[in-house]
Image (spheres, rainbow, N blue to C red):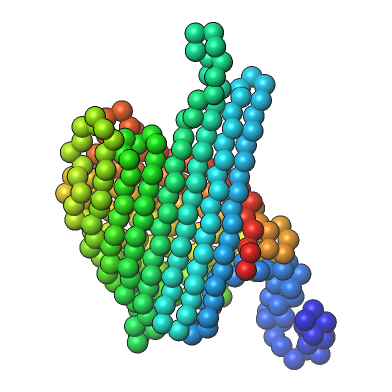
Amino acid sequence: MRLWVLAVIACGSVPSYAADKNLIQTLYHTDFTYNQNEQEDLFSLDGELGVLNATGNTDAFSLKAAITSEQETSHWNNNYSAVLLYKQIEVENDGVTEDQVSAQRFYGAAQFDYKLQTPGRRFFMYGDYENDQFNGYDYRATLASGWSQRVWNTDESMFRYSVGPGYGFVSAEDGTQTNVNNGFILRASSEYQYQWYTGSRFRQFLSAEVGADNIKTRSETALSANLFDSLAMKLSFVAAFETQPLQGVPNLNTETSLTVVYRFF
């Protein structure tokens, strides 16, 4: 493949811009591509892992593991994701040193977009599940459906959004007093991606769930850079905000992580 690209460039049969683009893509092994023809079948699976173990003045351990997958067929575009976050610190209590869990969270989400006849326009179905040991709930879940559209999808960038009604399910821990109950919501989300020819990629995701008693928003900003072949380094910042959290729980929670991403296929 590389010899063919170099031969074409040497013969001068392609424009200089296209030749430079193909050469750079070949040299950097840009396997992390997402801009695909909507009629082509596609399935990708990325695994993400970040581990921090600190000893000395502060003993702490943190783990972030995630899986992200996208499936494209002639009629469907499906996205799946799951994230596990765990943090443990060493504290001293009455002269006794013991390990204490400071964060333990699992979050999974899936969205199924059914393609309509007009390119880029879809009908979506969405579901998520969250189990966080430190937010006052046994679990929270959401189901929603409505309109989705991929506004554009070029070689460099992609933008899509979805909006529609849904229902939020909440199970509070025993003894927790809350005015945030199960109920109908309006859910909206948007996603923008930009990819450089070197394989580096920027992603911005925003979502909001508006209910009668509470509004939840989530933002994820991520920048990844290829190391080689199917391996990349990813820096991400996640911010989750809600207007009516439980007592003792902050309105805003943030998470900054540096992880290694491996593309299985």
Where is the C terminus found, in terms of image quarters? bottom right
Instruction: Residue at 66%, 69% (x, y): give it.
Output: 31
* Place of residue 232 in the rendered image (x, y in percent of width and height, measured from the top left): 66, 57
Instruction: Residue at 37%, 48% (x, y): give it.
Output: 130
Direction top: furthest residue: 95
Q: In the image, 91: left or right of 160?
A: right
Q: Nearer the viewer, residue 7 or 35?
A: 35
Residue 100 visible, this orientation: yes
* Place of residue 189 in the rendered image (x, y in percent of width and height, measured from the top left): 35, 60
Q: In the image, 191: left or right of 233?
A: left
* Place of residue 84 in the rendered image (x, y in percent of width and height, measured from the top left): 50, 46
User: 210 above or below 149?
Assistant: above
Q: Nearer the viewer, residue 35 or 136?
A: 136
Residue 24 visible, this orientation: no
User: Could you say which quadrant of the image residue 178 lies in?
Assistant: top left
Instruction: Residue at 33%, 71% (x, y): give it.
Output: 124
Where is the N terminus found, in terms of image quarters? bottom right
Instruction: Residue at 20%, 49% (x, y): give it.
Output: 182
Q: In the image, 84: left or right of 13?
A: left
* Place of residue 235 in the rendered image (x, y in percent of width and height, measured from the top left): 58, 49
User: 74 above or below 27?
Assistant: below
Q: In the image, 103: left or right of 24?
A: left
**Labels in figure, total:** 0
